[in-house]
């Protein structure tokens, strides 16, 4: 089944499959016609870019993006995982992806079955499986009700956890634009941590912001320089 799905995607087809977070409507990020079809089927605002799933950090260079040393350090902490990172992009070659915003969001999943497909297909755009304005499909039945024969395949799965966190790395400081799976926010300081243990363990330190434990400090995404 995975090989068949990979062949459909490589040939420009689109379909619904479980990502590492929720069901996604996926297609090749390197085929403008597949991307355009997803926008049509999903009735998505043409001004909004799509999240791109990758199988390796090296895939990002294929979009002409240079990763800064700071962003590389952050990626080493958040990936593989359920965090989508926004990076700046130059030039017009991939304008069909960045939609004039000059940035793209990438995610390196921590899910074996999904990575196997990505290694065969290359990067995939993967918005949630729902028409704009409606809730994401929680199962294949709901996805079929949304899209019917408008897509080329449906693949079911289990263990989905909700939308990813979106982390903007395109500016001078990292900024969490959407809180979802993958990062944990300390209720005392508002900083975000990759590991829940760090967030819950830093309460007394952050309450007074002194006596900092270096191991905790370096784990806060906002503290990485």
Image (tube, rainbow, N blue to C red):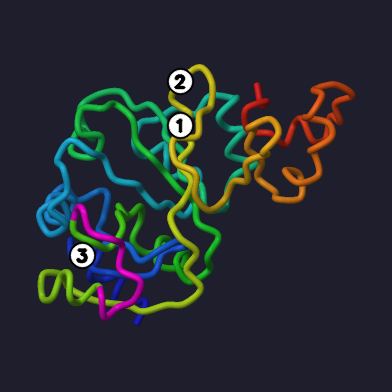
Residue ID at (76%, 44%)? 198
Residue to which mark 1 is pinned: 168
**Mark 3 → mark 1, Cα distance in angstroms:** 27 Å
Q: Main secondary structure of the magenta part?
A: loop
Numbered disc 1: secondary structure: strand
Quarter holding residue 144: bottom left
Q: Is residue 164 magenta?
A: no
Q: 27 or 119, which is in the foreground?
A: 27
Residue to which mark 2 is pinned: 171
Considering only vertical position in the picture, is 63 above or below 161? above
Numbered disc 2: secondary structure: loop
Quarter holding residue 152: bottom left
Residue to which mark 3 is pinned: 14
Q: Are marks 3 and 1 in contact (CB under 8 Å)?
A: no
Q: Are marks 2 and 1 in contact (CB under 8 Å)?
A: yes
**Would residue 78 be found to the left or right of residue 107 on screen?**
right
Q: How many marks?
A: 3
Image location (x, y in percent) of residue 164: 46, 51
Considering only vertical position in the picture, is 44 above or below 69? below
């Amino acid at each position: 089944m995975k090989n068949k799905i990979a062949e459909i995607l490589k040939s420009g087809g689109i379909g619904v499959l479980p990502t590492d977070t929720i069901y996604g409507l996926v297609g090749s990020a390197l085929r403008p016609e597949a991307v355009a079809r997803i926008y049509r089927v999903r009735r998505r605002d043409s001004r909004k870019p799509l999240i791109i799933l990758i199988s390796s950090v090296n895939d990002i260079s294929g979009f002409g993006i240079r990763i800064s040393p700071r962003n590389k350090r952050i990626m080493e902490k958040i990936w593989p995982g359920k965090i989508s990172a926004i990076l700046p992009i130059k030039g017009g070659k991939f304008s069909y992806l960045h939609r004039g915003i000059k940035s793209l969001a990438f995610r390196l999943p921590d899910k074996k079955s999904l990575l196997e497909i990505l290694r065969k297909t290359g990067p995939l755009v993967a918005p949630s499986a729902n028409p704009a304005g409606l809730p994401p499909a929680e199962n294949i039945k709901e996805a079929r009700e949304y899209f019917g024969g408008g897509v080329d395949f449906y693949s079911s799965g289990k263990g989905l956890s909700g939308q990813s966190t979106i982390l903007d790395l395109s500016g001078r400081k990292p900024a969490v634009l959407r809180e979802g799976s993958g990062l944990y926010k300390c209720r005392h300081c508002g900083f975000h941590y990759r590991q829940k243990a760090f967030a819950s363990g830093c309460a007394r330190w952050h309450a007074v912001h002194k006596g900092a434990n270096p191991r905790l400090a370096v784990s806060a995404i906002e503290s990485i320089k």
